[in-house]
Amino acid sequence: MTRRPAVAIGAAAVVVAAVAGVAIAASSGSGASPLSIAGAWSDGQGGTFTFTSSGPVSYTVSLKSADNPKCAVANDGTVTGSNGHFSGTIDLYPQPYNGPAGSCPPKTGLATITIVLSANGKTASIDDNGDNCSECGEGTWSRES
């Protein structure tokens, strides 16, 4: 009898997310575990979230939006977790931002986010929720690195 890995793939968790169609990217070294969130993640809509380890089970999140790539912030949020299951909060920004040329949008709120990695670690099911966040909800991200 073959055993399957004990990884919940379909579970949706509450996740804090900022930006329409949240994209997550995580930065990691070449030795990152497939069930680690570390590295870069794409939301498929031009957003990339980078997760960098900040402790044994915690990661800081930075967002780079295709709408405003120069406005990437080094610490847009924090998630904790392990073994393919992560949750935390992330800053929200207006999308699209129609402010003056050369300016960056102000933070408009905070969202909760839940991330569940697929068994092979190449995709992630995300669920984010926040006030005034019309783009929040369930989605799928793809690992870039």
Image (spheres, helix red, strand yellow):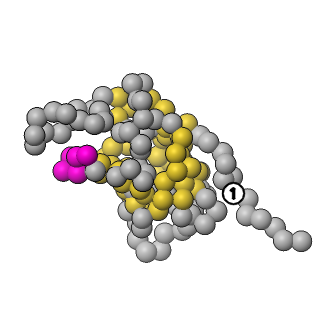
Residue 69 colored magenta? yes
Residue 58 x, y percent position in the rendering:
47, 51
In the image, what residue occupies the spot 69% across and 52% down? Answer: 8
Q: Quadrant of residue 90?
A: top left
**Residue 133 in view of the camera:** yes
Residue 135 x, y percent position in the rendering:
42, 35
Looking at the image, the residue that sits furthest to the top is: 131
In the image, what residue occupies the spot 38% across and 39% down? Answer: 20
In the image, what residue occupies the spot 56% across and 63% down? Answer: 121
What residue range appears in magenta? 67-73
Q: Quadrant of residue 42?
A: bottom left
Q: SS for tag 1?
A: loop
**Residue 57 in view of the camera:** no
Quadrant of the rendering where the N terminus is positioned: bottom right
Local packing at callout 1 (Cα closer than 10 Å; few below 14, some 14-19, many 20+) is: some
- On screen, residue 127 versus residue 91, left or right, reads right
Q: Is residue 27 above or below residue 110?
A: below
Looking at the image, the residue that sits furthest to the bottom is: 30
Q: Nearer the viewer, residue 54 or 64?
A: 64
Residue 1 colored magenta? no
Residue 138 x, y percent position in the rendering:
54, 41
Q: Is residue 92 above or below residue 131?
A: below
Q: Which residue is mark 1?
A: 7
Looking at the image, the residue that sits furthest to the right is: 1
In the image, what residue occupies the spot 41% across and 29% down? Answer: 133
Amino acid at dot 1: Val
Looking at the image, the residue that sits furthest to the left is: 101
Quadrant of the rendering where the C terminus is positioned: bottom left
